Each structure stands twice: as C-alpha cells, then as structure tokens.
Amino acid sequence: MKLFLVSFLLTLISTSQIYSQNSLQGIWEGGITVPGGELKIIFKIDKFADGYSGTLDIPQQGAKGLELDPIFQTGDSVALAFTAGQITGQFTGNFDSKTEISGNYSQGGPTTPFSVERTSLTTTPPKPENETDLIISNGEIQIGGTLTLPAGDVKAPLLIMSSGSGAQNRDSEVFGFKIFSDMAQRLAEEGIPSFRYDDRGVGESTGNFGNTTLDDLASDVETIMSYFQNDAKNKFQRFALLGHSQGGVVAGKVAAENVAVDQLILMGSTAPSLSEILRYQVEFAYAASPVEESLVEKEINAREELMKAIAFNNDIDAAKIGYNQAYSELLNALPDSQKNSIPDINAMVNNQTDQLAQIYSSPQVKSLLFYVPTDDLEKINVPTLVLFGGKDTQVTITQNQAKIRKALEISGTEFEIKIFDDANHLFQKANTGLANEYPQLDKKFVDGFLDHIIKWMTTN
C-alpha cells in the first residue's frame, strides 16, 4: 500500500464556547476508506485555553505520534491540518454525535470517506489504583515493571508475564493492543495478582536487549521472584509463570529449575529450537521456487551449517565459504528472467552471507539457535496450561502441539492443551491469522480466553 497518509491536513475545527459540549479532547479511533479495505487512524487530542494540540498514529504504516497542527473546530464542523515533506492531506467533517465524527479526506485530489469514534476522554488515562510501578535490580540491570493487585482476597499465585521475541514494553503492546495490561486488570478482578515488566533496553528497564542471552532473560525472571519473596510490603511465596511466544521458552526454563514456581502457562509458545523454526520458514519461502530441489536443499543445509559454526564457535570462515557457494549456485540456476533482474549476483551473495552471520552472531539469537524448549518441559513438575490459536500463523499448532504434548507426557505433570479456533498469535479473533491484519482487529482477546486462564489458575 502506498504511504496514503504519510502526512495530511485534517480538519476538525475548534468550537466556540457556545458549542463546547462537542469537544475534540480525547482519543479518537477509526479509519479512512482505501482501495481494498480501511486505513486505521488514531487521533490523540488535548484541549488548552487557547485551542487544541494533538498527534496522529497510522498503525498499518508504523507511524506514531505525528504532530497535528493546526487543529480547529467551529460548531459541529471540524478541521485539522498535517503536513510532512511534500505530502499534505485534509480531513473535513462534522460531529455525528458527541463521540463520532465523519467526513471526507483528500490529499490534493479525489476525496474518500473517513470516520472516527472517541474511545477515551483523555489522552493519558489515569493509572489504575491497584497498580504500582517498581524498579527491581538484577546486578547492574534495572528491571522496570508493574505490580497489579486484586482489591480483595488473593486466590492464585503471583503471575509473572514474559513477552515474546523482540524488545517489548511491559504491556506487550502490539499495534495498540496491550496484551499484558488488559490481562492484568481482568485477572485482578478475579483475585489474581500479576507482574509485567519491560524488556531490557525498553521503557524503564536498562541494558541492551539484543545483547541479552536466554540465560539473562531467565535470570530476570528469577530476580523478580526473589524480589517478591523478600519484599516486606508485597511478599509472595507462590508464583505462576506465563510466557507468550518466545517468552514461553524463558518461562519453561525457569519453571524447570526453580521450585518456587507453582504453575506454568504457555501462550502460543514454541516447541522446536530456533534453528528448526528458521529452517521451516526458509523451506516455506522456497516452496514455489523454480530452482531444482537439490540446490534449494543445499542452500538450506549450508545455512544450518553456518548456524552451527557460529553457535559452537567452530570454523566460522569455512561455513561462510560453504554458504556463499551454495547460495551462489542457487541464484545462478534461476531462470534468466529472474537472474537478469539481479544487478550483481556476487555482491548479493556476499551481502547475504555477511547479514546471516551477523544475525546468528547476536548474543540472543546465538543462545537460542540450538536450544530445545521441550527439553525443559520434560522436567516440569507443576500444573501446565498450553494455549494455542487455531489461526496462529507464527507458532502453528502443526509444528508445536504434538512436541509439547509429548514432552509434558514424559514429565508426568498435570497439563491441559486448549485451542481457541478463531484466535491468532495474539489471541484476538482473526480472519486469516496473518500478522498484516493485526492493526485492523479489535484490541481484545477472543471470547473465553481470559475466562479459561482464570478458571484454570484458581482451580490448580
């Protein structure tokens, strides 16, 4: 999709006092009609004595916090302007009600409909009274997180939540869907306390996420547990660990090693090693390749040999040469129509070899390449809940469920595997399950998801 809204003039026009009941103050969410669907937009607008100020988010284009200036309102007519680079756009519209605005968007040409609905009266909702922000020290690393407590009796262990791959904040926020924050508040209503935390190098946590190994990630969870075991004000002796996606690898590792863990929840978590996952992804990418299968297999095997050489520090230069040769053979076997579109095959091969070596050499990737999560699950001796989305295209049931089941059967522990048929990797109700539809989906869990976790935690 073109950058349909890299910048634009939006018109939402500032009310005279006589019409002040229709204020632009707050968060407005909606979309612009574009070919093939809708482009999500979010306005965050604050009211001051002399007018409005605000920002724009366009989640599907990765745009966040773009300044809106000027913003105007006259009666029920609205207008707001935004310009970036050489692109300008314009919204003109009207209040349909106190909480809805609709109109037309233009970018120097034809207009297209837009509509937004107010989802919050303030741009920074007040912090819930049952939440406390904490800083926990793990050596030189500071871990920033939020403790959420029930108003009444505590009915389950303290749930510590670990997010998936990539540097994420404590809410595990993806396109505005605050997975762990939403979960924490709902669990608290049912007597379940929780703690969620920023990954290293994110928010209030210090350190460098890319340089963090699996052992470091597990150490952070262990440190959080130790903190609450010894904190005079908020002391806990029983813990449940929840890991989403790659966070499940961390949670499983800690649960297998720490006797203070009473429950384990794996939420869309992986079973194979990272190297096996990467092999599967590359095989899928090559599925439609016109190159003969033996050359594809040779490239994939050479890629895996490069992983092994880097992971175990064993003759990396030779592995790079081997991959370079295999990838070069594959590209040179492409049909002329494809091969001729590559300006310099040797440069492309060398660049890819160097890029892969750099990726595999990063401390976190290196620590995960040949780490098999199910080895830990075979040692688990606490009740375990395994959750899958039926439409998850990132951690598929086919690739993961049987392996996790087998590992837990070997462990002899009590476990349950629950599949939410319509859920994606974030456990939202999905259409295709593909990541490119995340921004368009409702920012809430599929029906029954949180209820199932609550019932399981309070009865195990």
Image (cartoon, helix red, strand yellow):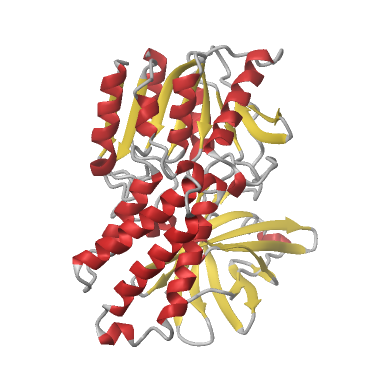
Residue shown at 32% from the left, 63% from the top: 299
202 relative to 179 in the view: left or right: right
Residue 320 in the image: x percent, y percent? 45, 62
Q: Quadrant of residue 63?
A: bottom right
Camera-side residue: 279 or 239? 279
Residue 55 in the image: x percent, y percent? 65, 62
Residue 378 in the image: x percent, y percent? 34, 23
Camera-side residue: 78 or 180? 180
119 relative to 424 in the view: left or right: right
299 relative to 44 in the view: left or right: left
Q: Is residue 310 visible?
A: yes
Residue 322 in the image: x percent, y percent? 39, 63
Residue shown at 80% from the left, 63% from the top: 50
- Quadrant where the C terminus sits is top left
Q: How many marks?
A: 0
Q: State whether residue 132 is above or below residue 368.
A: above
Camera-side residue: 253 or 176? 253
Q: Is residue 100 visible?
A: no
351 relative to 303 in the view: left or right: right
Residue shown at 29% from the left, 53% from the top: 431
Q: State whether residue 366 is above or below residue 359.
A: above
Residue shown at 62% from the left, 85% from the top: 86
- Quadrant where the N terminus sits is bottom left
